[in-house]
Image: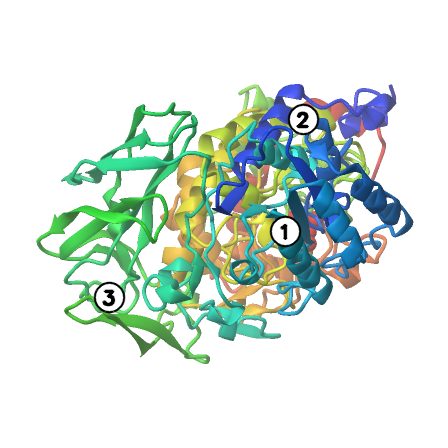
Amino acid sequence: MTTSEVAQGFTSADAQADRWVDPELVSLARRAAAEGTVLLTNNGVLPLAPGEGVAVLGRVQIDWFAVGYGSGGDVNPPYTTTLLDSLTAAGVAVDTELAATYRSWCADQPSPNAEWGQWPRHYEEMPLDDEAITAAAQRARTAVVVIGRAAGEDRENVLEPGSYLLTEDERSLLARAAAAFKHTVVVIDSGNVMDLSWAEEMGIDALLLAWPGGMEGARAVADVLTGAVEPGGRLPDTIAYRYEHYPSSAFFGGKEHNTYTEDVFVGYRAFETFTPERVQFPFGHGLGYTTFALAATAPERDGDTVRLRVSATNTGRRPGSTVVQVYAAPATRAALGVPARQLVAFARTGQVVPGDSEELDLSFPVERLTSFDDSGATGHAHAWVLEAGEHALHVGLNVREATRVGAVSVVDTEVIEQLEEALAPDPAHPFERWSVSYAPDGAARRTIEPVPVRTTNLRERILARLPEPITAAPAVGSSLKDVAVGTISLDAFIASLEPEDLAELAYGDVTMNSPLGAPGNAGAFGGVRARLRERGIPAVTTTDGPSGIRVSAFASLLPCGTALASTWDPALIERMEALHAQEMLRKGSDVLLAPGMNIHRDPLCGRNFEYYSEDPLLTGACAAAYVRGIQSAGVSACPKHFVANNQETNRWVNDSRVSARALREIYLRAFRMVVAEAAPRTLMTSYNKVNGVWSYHNYDLVTTILRGEWGYEGLVITDWWAQHATDPNFAALSDSAYRLRAQADVLMPGAESWEHQKREDGHDQTILTALDPADLSGEHLTLGELQRSARNVLRLVLSSPAMERLEAQIALHLS
Ligand code: BGC
């Protein structure tokens, strides 16, 4: 065992070659993948009858997509599974002749190499002539056709065959299989929603949507096909007949900016309001192998809570579980344009045997019935308001089938939370947004209205709220270990640090794969310089997620975010992530750069597979469960990308222009939930600008809203590298000084930009040049601001297992 291995979090060289994975984690991953698999249609052909002959078609049965590409997919799993092997292992009577043909062809045509940002979106299909299909149909009654799509970071999916659309080869394979076999089951293994409109024309008997489920994903799909496990998934996104039907489609993919014209009408909020007929599979839809009937009590308001109970009765012939969903309709006297349906509560039953019922408590906070008024239309600008009128509640098994169970009555509009204007669009770029007006018969008409733009003076806001420098007496010569054991206060320790030390704490180590952390890490921060380690501050190791720990060593590959969201089962996510956190301890990861929790604004976003849903409540609930699980072991999660990182194209420079209302109700809302319900210790800003200001320079985003309104006390780090910019309000502040004023505490990795990364020593003097401890006017960076970020960093360091590795890191003798 070498010192360097200890420093990196390894106990021996063998650790890196160790393929052991916790069997309990494996079994939860397999369960989550099955619970996240969505059965979209089934005319009774599934589950496969015991002994049923099955011909498996499509190369993805072997070249199975277990995860997407990029930082969220670059895990080194000890193994992965294929659908063909998994079906065979499950005892399915797979047609061996066809299987042999596919095996040999796939061995000769390996799937193409994946270059960063140039990932293949699909793999060319194996040609299969009519004769081979007819012959297979004589040997087996059922065809399982597997279609696959990859997704990845730094690249969008596109509205083309081989991405959102079927290729001609796939279409032909599906059509010929459907014509030749008695039954045709289609399995879609895809990181993104893709066009499925063909399924209706082709006479498919069952359609199963399996998001990349990690190393156990293919086994989980085999479990579902055989009926060993029920397909538990419910759609976290709407599937429309055509891409052009999605509300964002006309406003997505801009090279420099995207205007969020659709505003709060994201996904089902638009479809259910304006165009229900365009939906092929509604939000929340998914079949099991049994059926359920629901009975709800009338909802009642009890102070801040709406009380509601629903009983779910298994009316079918197999045991099973279901997801009960509650949606709110707009208040009958709403002054704001509110979507026709919004998810306000959900719960999954346990296994219920036929004839039995389970009663679920679906009570929820009344604030879920509120809207954010960014214009003053209700008489209460910049406030969460509970509008007057009847708020009807609908309960069901998906958004479309939910039926009215009663209403919450509000006599006069109530202000639930009065806030101040923050993060509003730039007056230099005004735009219009969608709204809605309802006729007395309930018919909705889409309207257009101007978006309220910024009226606040950010310079004045910042100057009025400058933090004071620390007043505690400096604990000269002290160590962070003294703070850890309670001999001195953190403030006394910080007061003893020189400005140079404080500035170093604001940067990560210069590159990814820091020598201070486990090989293959994403970077380190904290004690990245010898002088800081001598003061008792260890370097903290970050590694990518969300689907596993991205290090050189082997690590478990778990279901992707969309698969997890499809479970609608936060308790399961939390249990699985608690075991994942134990693996972090074994592999030397202190901070997992996960969960990815941006909203699925558009089905073509390349990273949707890492994220959860088009709905903020489902996203927030899943992300909070994930964070609680990870942090239960003392390591940290790092929700990302804060905020409005909704496309990959030009993500470093793109400006997301979006109303304060859509930010609050859709894009910020899940982050707020995660802060309130799981207290993440770190959080990552996004690359993009939000209303003209890069998120890591964005004072209103990070200080006014995240820390001020939500009371977030953790660390904020940037996404990897940043753009150069000078603060338009304070000419002396640029780049990292501008960032610290916003309270984005650490630049990751540690160089100002890609160009600086190439230098030997990436740290420049940006912060120290901008700092003037004697100037309290705010024209320069103040000591109080520098100390404030150091406090955010050191709190995280103190909570981290890295404290145990300090001595070993010192012994590395790095500068
Ligand atoms: C991604 C982040 C990731 C980071 C480190 C960035 O390109 O956007 O999600 O955590 O790289 O790998």
In the picture of the structure, the residue carrying the numbered disc 1 is: 190
Specify few, some or many for label 1: CA neighbours under 10 Å numbering under 14, 14-19, or 20 or more: many
**Mark 1 or mark 2: whose residue is earlier in sequence:** 1
Q: In which quadrant of the rendered image does the C terminus lie?
A: top right
What is the spatial separation of the Cα atoms under label 1 and label 2, in whole angstroms? 27 Å
- Relative to 478, is 365 above or below? below
Q: Compare residues 775 and 266 and report the one nearer the observer.
A: 266
Q: Compare residues 600 and 31 and report the one nearer the observer.
A: 31
Residue 52 position, x and y percent, is 64, 34
Q: How many marks overall?
A: 3
User: Which residue type carries mark 1?
Assistant: Ser
User: Which residue type carries mark 3?
Assistant: Leu
Q: Name the element at disc 1.
A: strand
What is the spatial separation of the Cα atoms under label 3 and label 1, in whole angstroms? 37 Å
Q: Is mark 2 within 8 Å of ligand 1?
A: no
Q: In which quadrant of the rendered image does the N terminus lie?
A: top right
Mark 3 or 1: the one toward you: 1
Residue 671 visible (yes or no):
yes
Q: Name the element at disc 2.
A: helix
Residue 128 falls in which quadrant of the image?
bottom right
Mark 1 or 2: the one toward you: 1
In the picture of the structure, the residue carrying the numbered disc 3 is: 336
The dot on residue 604 is none
Q: Is mark 1 within 8 Å of ligand 1?
A: no
The dot on residue 583 is 2
Residue at 23% x, 68% y is: 376
Q: Compare residues 78 and 394 and report the one nearer the observer.
A: 394
Cβ atoms under marks 1 and 2 closer than 8 Å: no
Name the side, left or right, on which 329 lies relative to 54. Answer: left
Residue 699 position, x and y percent, is 48, 59
